[in-house]
């Protein structure tokens, strides 16, 4: 390889964010599908103290949980009710507790054939 190409590759690798740049985690969020069709919850575990807090009221089965910045994103599968979409994405502001929901189609988390590399 040419020296200029190697220098560019090194610069690209050096510029990438590394895991050491990420802030230390302070909490763990665990999704609980629930025993019934409408009682899924998310449990927050404080990593320093071990204290837990349960967030409920999602109105369906919790299928997936992610934290993006200061927002908790929850994929919820609601019981079938006519033509209303069964899937919902609930976004919880972790600072204020404010919650918004957006309907989505099927809440399936299984990859479909020919959709994903």
Image (cartoon, helix red, strand yellow):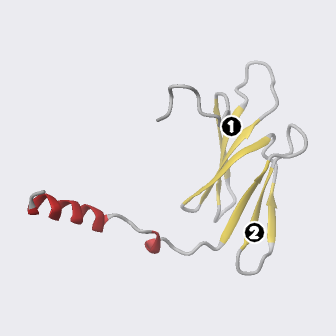
Instruction: Return the residue found at the far front.
Output: 1
Query: Which residue corresponds to mark 2?
Result: 45
User: SS of the residue at dot 2?
Assistant: strand
Q: In this view, does 22 lie to the left or right of 50?
A: left
- Which x, y percent locates residue 81? 81, 24
Q: Nearer the viewer, residue 81 or 10?
A: 10
Q: Please, is residue 42 above or below residue 39 in the view?
A: below
As drawn, is 71 to the left or to the right of 42? Answer: left
Q: Residues within 10 Å of mark 1 (few under 14, many from 20)?
A: many
Residue at 73% in and 24% down: 84
The image position of residue 105, as x and y in percent, is 64, 28
- Residue 6 on image: x %, y %: 16, 62
Of all residues, the one furthest to the right in this rendering is 35
In percent of the image, x 81 and y 41: which residue is there?
59
- Compare residues 111 and 59 and report the one nearer the observer: 111
| Foreground tag (1 vs 2) | 2
Q: Give how far apart the Cα atoms at labels 1 and 2 are.
A: 24 Å
Q: Residue at x 25, y 61 (%)?
A: 12
* Mark found first going from the N terminus, 1 or 2: 2
Q: In which quarter of the image is residue 111?
A: top right
Q: Which of 69 and 22 is in front in this view?
A: 22
- Picture quadrant of residue 107: top right
Secondary structure of the residue carrying numbered label 1: strand
In which image quadrant can residue 96 be found?
bottom right
**Depth check, front residue: 78 or 29:** 29
Q: Are marks 1 and 2 in contact (CB under 8 Å)?
A: no
Say above or below: 115 vs 95: above
The residue beneath circle 1 is 88
Q: In which quarter of the image is the N terminus?
A: bottom left
Q: Which residue is drawn at 56% across and 75% down?
A: 24
Give the class, few, some or many, for how many residues have Cα within 10 Å of label 2's Cα (few <14, many ≥20).
some
């Amino acid at each position: 390889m040419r020296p200029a190409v190697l220098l560019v590759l090194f610069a690209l690798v050096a510029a990438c964010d590394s895991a050491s740049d990420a802030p230390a985690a302070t909490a763990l969020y665990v999704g609980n599908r629930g025993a019934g069709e409408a009682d899924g919850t998310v449990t927050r575990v404080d990593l320093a103290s071990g204290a837990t807090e349960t967030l409920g009221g999602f109105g369906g089965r919790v299928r997936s949980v992610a934290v993006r910045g200061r927002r908790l994103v929850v994929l919820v599968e609601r019981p079938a009710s006519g033509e209303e979409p069964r899937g919902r994405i609930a976004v919880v502001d972790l600072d204020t507790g404010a919650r918004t929901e957006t309907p989505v189609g099927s809440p399936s988390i299984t990859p479909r054939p020919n959709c994903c590399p």
